[in-house]
Image (cartoon, helix red, strand yellow):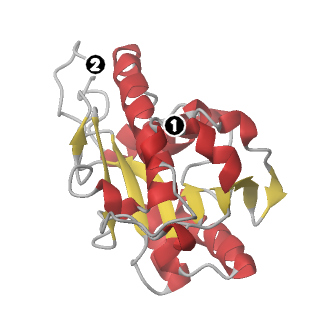
Amino acid sequence: MIELIAFLGNPGDRYARNRHNVSWLFAEKLPFAGCLDTQKKYKGRYAALERDRLLPFLKTAEDAPDDSAESTDNAAESPADIPRRFHFVFPETFMNLSGESVAAAASFFKIPPGRILAVHDELEMPLGVAGFKFGGGLGGHNGLRSMKASFGTADFWRLRIGIGRPGDREPGKGGNPGRHGDIAGWVLSDFEEADLPVLERVFAAASDALASALLRGPGALLPEWNKKRVL
């Protein structure tokens, strides 16, 4: 099960629309974003959401947990295991110290790493693809590195939103690899206009998946959502 969701990004207007901040852009589009009343806490912005307030945002009623019966879906968590409150944190320590914020919230609520979901940009997946995974490599992502350093393990859930690498697309077709020849320049550059319709589709699909992951358990989405090509 997941209890704590961490959206990894960089604070400030300078970084707001960067590829590296795709998780924050995604959070803005969540159908329940208006229910997240954030406050300054845990070296970032923090909000809590009761499970019952999330239920109306499920895409289908069949996804809703039934407390009165045992789950018959082996991939889903038992309804009794689904938390009644979810915690959301937006670290404002800058990406390379994200783990400090996530660990502060996790420590206060006594949430182990295996019940944490990090939402982040993914270079190794092209734009239009998103996916859930548990543990594994960090792919050079400084936010994930910081989380591993803070928790002493990389065994936490991730929701990866593909941004591709510089050079994945031709100039004039939603990307200009000549302008972003290095990784740092690429992730710290803004999405282009041609990317925005793709992101909208990805965010819509990933929002439904996130609600299902929280209320049924992320394992219920695998293997379909290992690398889900939305477009």
Q: Between 39 and 83, which is closer to the camera in this rendering?
A: 83
Write down the quadrant of residue 75 in the picture: bottom left
The answer to whether residue 134 is left or right of residue 210 is left
Q: How many other residues sit within 10 Å of disc 1, few (<14), some (14-19) or many (≥20)?
A: many
Identify the residue at the far front of this view: 68
Q: Which quadrant would residue 193 be assigned to in this image? A: top left
> Mark 1 sits on what residue?
26
Residue 142: image x %, image y %? Answer: 44, 63
Q: CA distance from mark 1 to mark 2?
A: 19 Å
Type of residue at label 2?
Answer: Gly
Q: Position of residue 138 (x, y in %)?
A: 33, 68
- In front of the other: 65 or 83: 65
Mark yes or no: residue 188 visible. no
Along the viewing direction, whichever of 167 and 205 lies nearer the viewer: 205
Q: Helix or strand or loop: what does disc 2 sit on?
A: loop
**Residue drawn 38% across and 17% down?**
197
Vertical placement of 6 versus 15: above or below? below
- Where's the C terminus, which quadrant? top left
- Give the label on residue 108, or none: none
Amino acid type of the residue that numbered disc 1 sits on in the rendered structure = Phe
Residue 150 in percent (x, y) is at: 55, 80
Circle 1 — which element? helix
Examine the rendered structure and indicate whether residue 193 appears above or below residue 81.
above
In the image, residue 99 lies at what x, y percent?
Answer: 57, 70
Say which of marks 1 and 2 sits in front.
Answer: 1
**Residue 213 relative to residue 186: left or right:** right
Residue in the image at 39% along x and 27% along y: 199
Q: Which residue is mark 2?
A: 174
Label 2: how many residues lie within 10 Å, few (<14), some (14-19) or many (20+)?
A: some
